[in-house]
Amino acid sequence: MKPGTIAIPVLGAMGIAVLAGLFPAHDSSTRRWQPKLTRAQAISAAQKLAQEYGTNTSGWSTYVSTRIDRQNAQVREAFDGKAITEAFNPLQIRVLATSPKDSEAVLVTLAPDGRPMGYLDRHPKAQTAKQDHVPGLAERELQRYAGGFAGRFERTASGVRSQEGWRSAFEWADADSAGMVAHIEVVTSGPRVVRVDYRLDVSARLLAPIRETNSRMQGIKGGVRIVLLSALTLLATYLVFARLTKRKDHTAFGYRAIGIAAVPIVLAVVGGAASSDGAFRSFDNGGLGDASVVLSLAINAFLALTVFVLVAAGYSILPARERPQWIGLRLVTLGRLGDRQFGREVALGLWAGAGLACLPYLIAALPFWSKAVVEIFDPGFLYSPAPGFEPFEGLILSWETYGFFVLALPWAIFKIRRPGLRWALMGTVGVVFVAVYRDPFPALFWPNVVYGAALLGGLALLYRATGMLAVWVAPVGLWGATFAATFLAFGQGAGWRVVAVQGLALGAAVCVWIFGRATDEEAVQTLMEPGELGLSRSDRDRLQAEFSVARRAQQGMLPSSAPEIPGYSIQGVCEPAREVGGDLFDYLPFPNGQWGFCVADVSGKGVPAALYMTLTKGMLASAQTRFPDLPVIASRLNRFVVETGKKKTFITMSLGVLDAEQRVFRHVRAGHNPPVLYRSATKSCEFLQPKGVGLGITGSLIFERNLEVQDVSLEPGDTIVLYSDGLTECMNSKQEQFGEERLVAVVQQSAHLNALGIEAAIIEAARVFRGEADPHDDLTVVVLRAENGPVTRRSQTQDPLR
């Protein structure tokens, strides 16, 4: 049984239980907004009010949304208990009715308890002031809107003629709350009410300290959001285009992953949320109807495009060790929604997300933050035409998923080799990212940080136990659990509709998990290899066969055996990371019985690197017969690489010539890893580090000016080890590198062996260190040992630093 199969449902159930217990005492909907009115009740109240005002909206298209007056909310919190602030609930329920031909519209604003807070009749008949003023009508509306506070208002205008109609106004200047004035303005046209405006004005003197505190906090959060989003966008855009030279399938992967982000867009259209949003946009901009639905869909389409860029960028640099976590997402891009792995990740993601919904309420319940109130979602979902579909917005708005797990995490593994630094950096960035985008405590700092760490940790555990798809789906469960808790806290039946839709999604996923098609995870991971997208099995088998032939041909170009030089033992090996690679080693006969030794590494891997390796070998063989001097050979090779590679390809190389009789090794280094020199007399190692620039990086003048030749005298037992960076940068499953320190330790431990034994000890130590991790680069080693006496036998070795 896979990890998390039992633990995630158990922990999820515990989280749901905690949410049910803590939600009523710590959520803003129950502590502040008190939205007792249901959607149906709001529509009924609005129709009744419009009918009483002279407009029959029966048969009209009706939309409901909410709006929070943030300034009012801040004032109410700062002056808690003041009568004038209690008269205004910051949560406004807006009901918009438009006629069948979109020629007329009525907007009714209600308080959460059903009391009217505003009215606007955008109606041709209402735009005239020709009808007579009806006395007493404005006073009736004062009683309706102000309720028990009506007696505190004083008339400031009565029956003043205006373009809209007859205007009357009332004002409440509370003596106990200097600087706050409540206004009610009523516009009538005969017996019809055209507009009612009920508002609270607060002086700049009172707002200044409130705005300063909140503006500073929101400014910091806004700045962090902009910086993070800009950095992610720039990084993602760069990677999408830059990685086109490395692989071609990441853009197709990103396009197909958009299907997940398209789910909430489709549900918004089907459920009516898109039409509702479009209707309010049109009305607020002076128009009528839902023509602005196109704008709403365009915004969602832009978000989907952003998802494409982030997913494509993350996939383009996806390390091999992370591919198992992306299997579920890969199945989505293949259209294999009937695989068990797909069902497993969706089911566990939904359940885990529901459990994680309790986190902000647990934090709010801590005694450190007695005033912490959770405000993680805008209450607009309470009045959605299809509340069961609302949680699926999490698929397109879950930025902590895209920002961290889709892109930042693969990039960190791809770029940062030191595990401690990587996890410290990613942990900090991830916590900040989640905290500023979720922001469940708008006026507080540390509770948001704790929440960011807790949610990031929960999602990270889910990612490791299941996969990327589960993390992507988790916000749907989180939103669904929170939305259902909000509805049920006020006894609204819509909560059960949310639970039903979540249950159907979870049940369908569980059925696929149990009864679906078995997933060949190894085959799916193979499809994530660069260039594998879209290849049939027969094509892959054919390419595999061709690469096998290419590998045998390339290996055939490398020396099959070392030269026999009296007084020396020599051994070399090259292990390509792929079927063909870019590492090279060779033995070169020079005049006067001298021998050359070369280890080179072509930038890149695979076929392009192998082609340059072949060309380099040919040029090296040609140059060493005509130009026996090392600096001249290196300069000729540099000119060749510059001309053919056009500075897009470079080669590092260690090239040396052994004078066996004089026991002198002359060496040049063109940007390559420094060879290890073991001195038997002192039983110590040193690195040969003459100056040198990689081949193909710069022109001849700079190259020759920076090239040094180093002569090394050898005594019996002394050993020189030439190698490529595939050895020292060999990584294990913990992303630790083999490193120069381990290499030196292996050489010292095996120094009593001949070259064959030393080479075998180095390769074995690297293999033991790497373990089950895939090799990420070609590995080449050449050993030259000065002998004096019989060759010693080879012995076993282990990682010397373990």
Image (spheres, grey):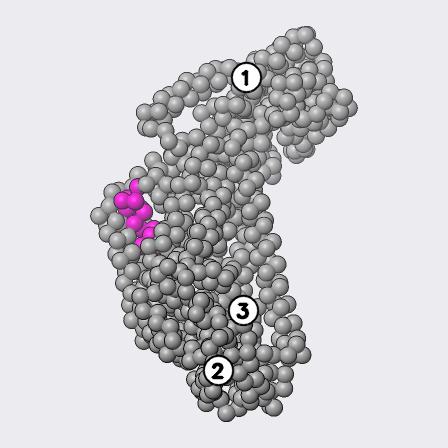
Occupied quadrant, residue 112: bottom left
Cα–Cα gap, marks 3 and 2: 47 Å
Q: In the image, what residue type sits under mark 3?
A: Pro
In the rendered view, tell whether residue 665 sits above or below residue 471. Answer: above
Q: Nearer the viewer, residue 248 or 429?
A: 248
Relative to 498, 374 lies left or right:
right
Relative to 152, 97 lies left or right:
left
Give the residue drawn at x 35%, y 69%.
57
- Bin the neighbour count of mark 3 within 10 Å (Cα to Cα): few under 14, some 14-19, many 20 and up: some
Q: Is residue 467 visible?
A: no
Q: Is residue 596 visible?
A: yes
Residue 442, numbered circle: 3
Q: In the image, what residue type sits under mark 1?
A: Thr
Which residue does the numbered mark 2 point to in the structure image? 133
- Bin the neighbour count of mark 1 within 10 Å (Cα to Cα): few under 14, some 14-19, many 20 and up: some
- Whichever of labels 3 and 1 marks the residue nearer the N terminus, that label is 3
Nearer the camera: disc 1 or disc 2: 2
Magenta part of the protein: which range? 336-350
Which residue does the numbered mark 1 point to in the structure image? 614
- Main secondary structure type of the part rendered in magenta: helix
